[in-house]
Image (tube, grey):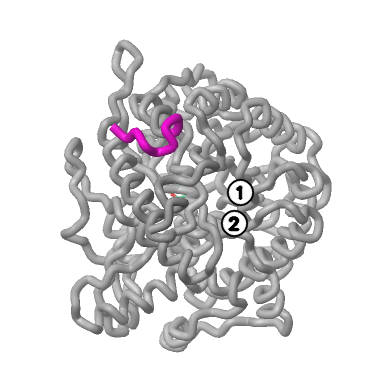
Amino acid sequence: MSETNKGFPKDFLWGASSSAAQVEGGFDQGGRGLSIWDVKTLNPNTASFHYASDFYSHYKEDIALMAEMGFKAYRFSISWSRILPEGEGEVSQAGIQFYRNVLDELHKYNIEPVVTIYHFDLPLALQEKYGGWINRQMIDAYVNYCRILFKNYPEVKYWLTYNEQNMLTFFGAFDMLGSGNPKSNNDLYNEAHVGLVAQAKAIHLCHELLPDAWIGPAPNLTTSYPASADPKDYIAAQNMDDLRNNFYTDALVFGRYPQSVYAYFEMNDVVLDVHEDDFEIMRTCKPDFIGFNCYGNDTTEHLDYYELDFSDVDMSDNTNKSYLMKLMEKPGVGKSVVNPYFAENSVDGNRYDPYAIRVTARRLTERYHLPVLLTENGYGRPDTLTEDGQIHDDYRIEHLRETIKQMKIGIEEGAQLIGYCPWSAMDLVSTREGISKRYGFIYVDRDEDDVKAQTAEMKRYRKDSFHWYKKVIASNGEILD
Ligand code: BG6
């Protein structure tokens, strides 16, 4: 092993992540237009995204806390409908100014912004006008939005095109964003294709306007472990990787989809509407790095083809585990099963996969020969604020510590990992489980009650993990106790 491969690189991007809809609040302030998340059907007793963690008013305090932890980077997303209230057309100067303020504040502390252009919160106006990503007019709408961002924020070095596009497809049969209408596989994969052409065009545009910037996608990438040594499980794991992961990154790096996915398309009557230049645009766009969210790798068991039946799944509350398990069944490919080898958290007994990032960062480096940036990983739990203002989240510290230990070995083995931005900097509203499922280093004092949230102070507290992460960053990942 060469000396240069020992430990974390000097300029490793330690930080954390968030998304506009999940932290900002201020849904009706500064002329912001509505997004599909403002009107989405919520699970019972969960906070809406209207007030979230009120980063809109607390951004200075939050960024100061990030600086106190020693963050080198902060990954956040821009709300499309704050910049373009109607999704296209007139630009909101108040929206542009808000992110200018955020960027200036980050700059003050030398924190590198990692900007996600689009993180689930499609402007409602575009959903209504075009019906969402199924419509190829979304390509121009998205590229127009990107152009506005590139022109207004030329100092941003790291851009991420689209958060977890693959999850919107993979879990999209019931639309995890709450429309309640199951989508056909044909629609889902055609949406995916349109989204990929749009991203490829945005990558071209970024390179043209900002030659020094880096731009890449940010899917949720895992690596499938075969459930057993049965060759059928091994093949299922390979095919699952193609379907769930490689489809999205191969498109943008190689300009093609993995061959095994076409067999899945045939079984599921998927016919892609591919236009003449689509693959050429993708083949030539050349992302500079791959951002990836990774909460744990999958374990896959072979499944013969059968017609999926969702009739026994309760769609009114998608926090139900059976809902997610059903969406992870891909007949003809495989299904996700419990992995008995995963670690057991010694504090709360939950199982997790500390090897996930090590394995996947290695796999991505080998497949794409590009740097990789971890854009999400984390441990969502209902933390408790003690009377004297403390949060003892040892379960989170254990999860992060064991993950970072493995990441370090992964780098020594050759993974070209350039940064770690776990989810999340501060507590925020989960996609499906409200604010009680907390991920942050910074505790935000509010509960699920939206009425109270409108006037709540939303005081910030430092969790135990805050103090711990500060030491990790200061020692460049050497001190993990
Ligand atoms: C990722 C998303 O899927 O996981 C985030 O990019 C999300 O937006 C995070 O919040 C955690 O998932 P959840 O469902 O617990 O919020």
Residue at the limit of the structure toward the top, as seen here: 388
Residue 362 percent across, percent down from the top left: 41, 62
Q: What stretch is highlighted in magenta?
A: 473-481
Residue 280 percent across, percent down from the top left: 70, 79
Mark 1 Cβ and ligand 1 under 8 Å apart: no
Q: Quadrant of residue 297?
A: bottom left
Residue 31 percent across, percent down from the top left: 74, 35
Which amino acid type is shown beneath numbered disc 2?
Tyr
Q: Which of 168 and 203 is in front in this view?
A: 203
In the rendered image, the quadrant that contains the N terminus is bottom left
Q: Which of 109 and 393 is in front in this view?
A: 109
Res 94 seen here: yes
Q: Does the magenta segment cover residue 438?
A: no
* Residue 182 in the figure: left or right of residue 272: left
* Residue 20 in the figure: left or right of residue 7: right
* Residue at (41% x, 87% y) in the render: 267
* Residue at (68% x, 34% y) in the render: 103
Q: Give the overall secondary structure of the magenta segment.
A: loop
Q: Does the magenta segment cover residue 476?
A: yes
Alpha carbon separation for disc pair 1 and 2 = 7 Å
Which amino acid type is shown beneath numbered disc 1?
Thr
Residue on which the image places disc 2: 162
Res 188 seen here: no
Residue on which the image places disc 1: 116
How many other residues sit within 10 Å of disc 2, few (<14), some (14-19) or many (≥20)? many
